[in-house]
Image (tube, grey):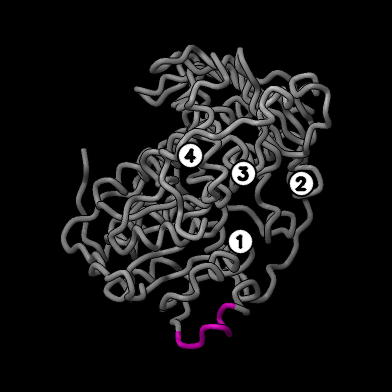
Amino acid sequence: MTQKISRRAMLRGAGLAAAGLWIAAGGEDSRGESRSPGEKLNLAIVGCGGQGGENLNQVAGENVVALCDVDLRSAARAFERFPKARKFRDFRKMLDAMHRQIDAVVVSTPDHMHAPISLAAMQLGKHVYCEKPLTWGIAEARQMAQTAEQKKVATQMGTQGMAEDRSRAGIEVIRSGVLGEVTEMHVWTDRAAGWWPQGVDRPRETVAVPEGLDWDLWLGVAPQRPYHPAYCPFKWRGWKDFGTGPLGDMGIHNAAMPYLGLELGLPKAAEILATSGLKDETFPAWATLRYEFPARGGRGPVTLYWYDGGKRPPAALIGGREVAKNGAIVVGTKATLYSIEWTGGDWHLLPEGKFRDYQSPPPTVPRAPQQSHHQEWLRACRGGPPPLCNFATFAAPLTETMLVGNLALRTGRRIEWDAQSMRAPGCPEADRFIRRQYRKGWQH
């Protein structure tokens, strides 16, 4: 049952259901007017430092009318660069004050706040660009996809390498049948090692909140805990309350091209093969997992192996050559596709001698303007075709796939995934990670 509330109550009271989902808004829909191809969009940026700063650089040619960040330190450069933009710390106040002026919103916050911010914006008819992974929880990803379709807004998840022509050509190569029957896929990353802490416990010492940081707003929907520099900035990714670990960070990137090429859909199971050891607060320092995908369309079942923390697949899969720090390998009965590093654009067909004169199939996947993820989204905001990495057909299912693996890492159990009912039968302890209970004060 969908409960209706006023827009003002939804925003000021955070409008979040006890199950951790945004309640549908009733009443006024403040959808921005359609724009001509040459007319600038009015953009709001939520999260202005780090990756948010890079996203801001990519859309700075539009009208940046609002900037929002809970940390004045990380936002300082953006605030100075756009003196005419209105400044906010709370996204709810920004949307409440400027819903008539804003056409689209860019969300570059920690994972746990992706859904609350993006859903609020989409409910008001705003186009949304959201960083990866799409959400912290699976139910959030489902609602993000549904809301994007219902509101008919342009959406894009930040998997920037997927905008490259060669990434899209890789999809076409996989779909061409040149690999033969694909039975397994290997995806890996060097993270988290050297990037952020994992496999550690919660710090015990008390540290003062830095000047300029609104810690309560930073926590948002996550459970209350004291501030510590072990969490922010940037180091939040490995903490289970805030981030989604290497699967959410780099699994989204490294698996994207072959995931689309194989049209994997949702897994039926995921399990841990080995880890450095499970912790309550953080994901393990390293882990290897196995996913099972059922037969779909014209292909048979596929097994996906995941490696992180510096673990890598056997070099024998690629003829004994050195395995890159990040990448993916798609193994077929006739050939192997090796995608090097995280963009998906640098791929090779093996054995190399057999494919020295190989010509890629004719393009069937639309190319992004200027090979730019952001320009593809901005074009869609102006009424152009939907981006390849939109929420409904790409971002939500890929995010859900990665988060099913995280259910195994969070519970220490094999996960049999019932996608239709959005449950892990026989593993009730997974329920709270599928449908998150939001913190008091962020619930309706």
Q: Is residue 139 magenta?
A: no
Can you tell which mark lies on residue 201? Answer: none
Instruction: Label 4: state its secondary structure.
Output: loop
Q: Answer left or right for 29 relative to 249.
A: left
Distance of mark 3 from mark 4, alpha carbons? 28 Å
Q: Nearer the viewer, mark 2 or mark 1?
A: 1
| Labels 4 & 2 near each other (Cβ < 8 A) | no
- Label 4: which residue? 137
Q: What residue sits 32% from the left and 62% below the top? A: 126
Can you tell which mark lies on residue 197? Answer: 2
- Is tag 4's residue or tag 2's residue first in the polypeptide sequence? 4
**What residue range appears in magenta?**
78-84
Vertical side of 318 occupied by 340: above or below: below
- Is tag 1's residue or tag 3's residue first in the polypeptide sequence? 1
Q: What residue sits 50% from the left and 74% below the top? A: 60
User: Amino acid under label 4?
Assistant: Gly
Vertical side of 394 occupied by 119: above or below: below
Distance of mark 3 from mark 2, alpha carbons? 29 Å
- Is tag 3's residue or tag 2's residue first in the polypeptide sequence? 2
User: Amino acid under label 3?
Assistant: Gly
- Label 3: which residue? 345
Instruction: Label 1: state its secondary structure.
Output: helix
